[in-house]
Image (cartoon, grey):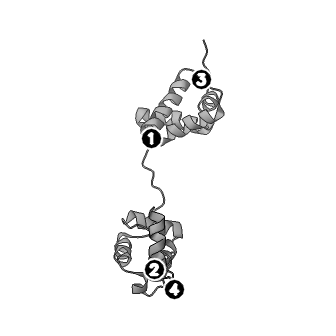
Amino acid sequence: MTVRIDNKSAIFVLQDEIQRSEQARYDHRLHAVLLVAQGLTCPAVAELLGDPERTIRYWVQNYISDGLQGLIENERSGRPPRLEPRHIDKIGKVLRGTPEDVGLCGAIWDGKTLSAYIQRDIGIALGVRQCQRLFRDLGFRLRKPRSFITRANEEEQKIFKKKSDA
């Protein structure tokens, strides 16, 4: 009895799952090399596993030259950080105050304000999203300002609050 999964989205889900962990990626490379060792061609394995043929050839070459060690993933360097640790320390201290303390407009920090501060004082241009990520990395939460109605009637507010509690 043959069992088939015909759903293309299932293939994408399974391939995505393989990419989630280093161990799963290693196992995937092992399977690819095993299939080549059993006589399948690199193009056939590439089609079967959904990887580029060039990648399969690269894995096989790594296995031939370095054995199983050649299939272990190396550290991914990624882009080097633009902010140095001293900059991050300075930003952490500044965020404990208000933007007004450092000569910027606004009562609370947000990504746009932090981006302006870093550009002005450190000379590095960071996007708003990067600055929002920096808040999280430094253990700060982004707060949204509450609107304040200057001419609000306190009695009407109390009545409204009583009605909304019920």
Residue 12 occupies which quadrant of the picture?
top right
How far from the left and from the top, in percent, is residue 25? 48, 37
The residue at which mark 2 appears reads as: 155
Residue 107 as seen in the image, left or right of residue 36: left
Within 10 angstroms of label 4, few (less than 14), some, or many (20 or more) residues? few
- Label 4 amino acid? Arg
- Label 3 amino acid? Leu
CB within 8 Å, label 2 to label 4: no
Query: What residue appears at the point 59 percent right and 23 percent down from the top-left corner?
Result: 40
Query: What residue appears at the point 42 percent right and 49 percent down from the top-left corner?
Result: 75
Tally the numbered discs.
4
- Give whichever of discs 3 and 2 has the lower sequence position: 3
Name above or below for residue 123 compared with residue 56: below
Give me the C-alpha separation between circle 3 and circle 2. 81 Å
Query: What residue appears at the point 63 percent right and 36 percent down from the top-left corner?
Result: 9
Q: Quadrant of the C terminus?
A: bottom left
- 71 or 124, nearer to the observer: 124
- Give whichever of discs 1 and 2 has the lower sequence position: 1
Select label 3 or label 4 by which is in front. 4
How far from the left and from the top, in percent, is residue 97? 36, 80
Give me the C-alpha separation between circle 4 and circle 1. 57 Å
